[in-house]
Image (tube, rainbow, N blue to C red):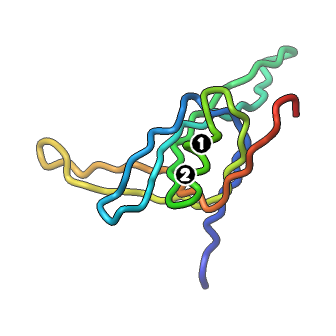
């Protein structure tokens, strides 16, 4: 049986995207997306923020570079991916991020 790896996030960009050109000439960008959730503590409610690393490629990266800035409200569709490498002292390192497959710009005031 095949699994499903689907992510949908709606949040606020923490900074302008970090844009780079890949070795094959395609544009890539990385951005930090903040989402919040309500947390109940007795009778009181508060919000907790979760930060997500999102990577975009090609046209999506170019659109993000042009239209997304700090504080932009955006929605991302994508999938989780994990990079692995051997770090200092031979320890295996992991980094999980969202590989974006769609970017939705949310107008201000919405």
x, y percent for residue 61: 53, 52
Which residue has dot 1 on it?
66
Tell me the element at label 1: helix
**On the rendered image, what quadrant is the C terminus found in?**
top right
Task: Kindly indicate the quadrant of the structure image that contains residue 60.
Answer: bottom right
x, y percent for residue 26: 42, 61
Along the viewing direction, whichever of 45 and 27 lies nearer the viewer = 27
Is residue 58 shown left or right of residue 95? Answer: right
x, y percent for residue 67: 65, 40
Along the viewing direction, whichever of 29 and 5 lies nearer the viewer = 29
In the displayed structure, would residue 43 be above or below residue 105? above
In the displayed structure, would residue 108 be above or below residue 2? above
Is residue 103 shown left or right of residue 58? Answer: right
Q: Residue at x 87, y 15 (%)?
A: 43
Which residue has dot 2 on it?
62
Along the viewing direction, whichever of 81 and 32 lies nearer the viewer = 32
x, y percent for residue 104: 73, 50
Q: Please say if the residues under marks 2 and 1 sit with CB atoms less than 8 Å apart.
A: yes
- Badge 2 crowding class, 10 Å Cα cut-off, few under 14, some 14 to 19, many 20 or more, is some
């Amino acid at each position: 049986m095949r699994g499903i790896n689907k992510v949908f996030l709606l949040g606020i960009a923490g900074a302008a995207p970090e844009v780079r050109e890949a070795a094959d000439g395609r544009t890539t960008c990385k951005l930090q997306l903040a989402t919040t959730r309500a947390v109940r503590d007795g009778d009181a409610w508060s919000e907790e923020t979760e930060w997500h690393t999102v990577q975009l490629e090609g046209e999506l990266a170019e659109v993000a570079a042009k239209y997304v800035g700090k504080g932009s409200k955006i929605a991302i569709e994508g999938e989780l991916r994990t990079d692995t490498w051997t770090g200092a002292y031979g320890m295996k390192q992991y980094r999980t991020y969202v590989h974006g497959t769609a970017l939705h710009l949310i107008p201000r005031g919405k």
